[in-house]
Each structure stands twice: as C-alpha cells, then as structure tokens.
C-alpha cells in the first residue's frame, strides 16, 4: 500500500463509495480532473475540502487515495 492509499476494507473506503466524506460526514463531492478510470474529487463542504483520487469501474469504487 502506498502513502495516502485508503484500504478497500476500511470505513473510510466504504464512506467514499457511498458519496460521503470520511473526514466531516458531508454528502457530496465537487468533481475535478479525470483521466481513464480515475477522477479527483473534493469534499463539497468548504470548511473541510478534503481531496481524494478515486478509481472506478462502472459505478463501483475500486481504489481511493488521499491527495
């Protein structure tokens, strides 16, 4: 596992898969740059603004990493 990677069995990963920020509990993200199966997202809560890089396959979250 690399630095910043979120384990797929963790509660953080499960929350991200549901569209919930694991840091503040806000539901919803602002979409950022994307390429291939990866997309960068930022928490929609301006106070939190946590950022993640997510890899998806269809509608399923496959990998997550903090950025």
Image (spheres, rainbow, N blue to C red):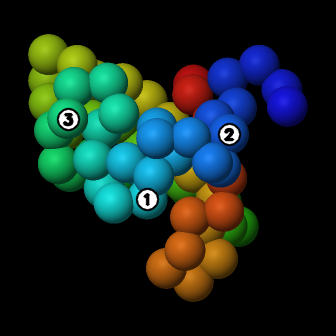
Q: Does residue 28 appear to the left or right of 64 in the view shown?
A: left
x, y percent for residue 14 = 45, 52
Which quadrant would residue 19 be assigned to in this image? bottom left
x, y percent for residue 1 = 85, 31
Where disc 3 sits, the SS reads: loop
Residue situated furthest bottom in the rendering: 58
Q: Residue at x 20, y 35 (%)?
A: 25
- Closer to the chain start, of discs 1 and 2, is 2
Residue carrying label 3:
25
Residue 47, placed above or below residue 58: above
x, y percent for residue 51 = 43, 29
Residue carrying label 2:
7
- Closer to the chain start, of discs 1 and 3, is 1
Label 2 Cα neighbours within 10 Å, binned few <14 / some 14-19 / many ≥20:
some
Q: Residue at x 14, y 16 (%)?
A: 47
Label 3 Cα neighbours within 10 Å, binned few <14 / some 14-19 / many ≥20:
some
Residue carrying label 1:
17
Marks counted in the figure total 3
Circle on res. 67: none
Where disc 1 sits, the SS reads: helix
């Amino acid at each position: 596992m690399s630095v910043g990677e979120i384990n797929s069995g963790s509660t953080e990963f499960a929350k991200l898969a549901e569209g919930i920020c694991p840091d503040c509990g806000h539901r919803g993200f602002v979409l950022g740059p994307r390429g291939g199966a990866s997309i960068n997202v930022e928490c929609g809560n301006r106070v939190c603004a946590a950022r993640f890089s997510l890899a998806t396959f269809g509608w399923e979250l496959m990998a997550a990493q903090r950025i």
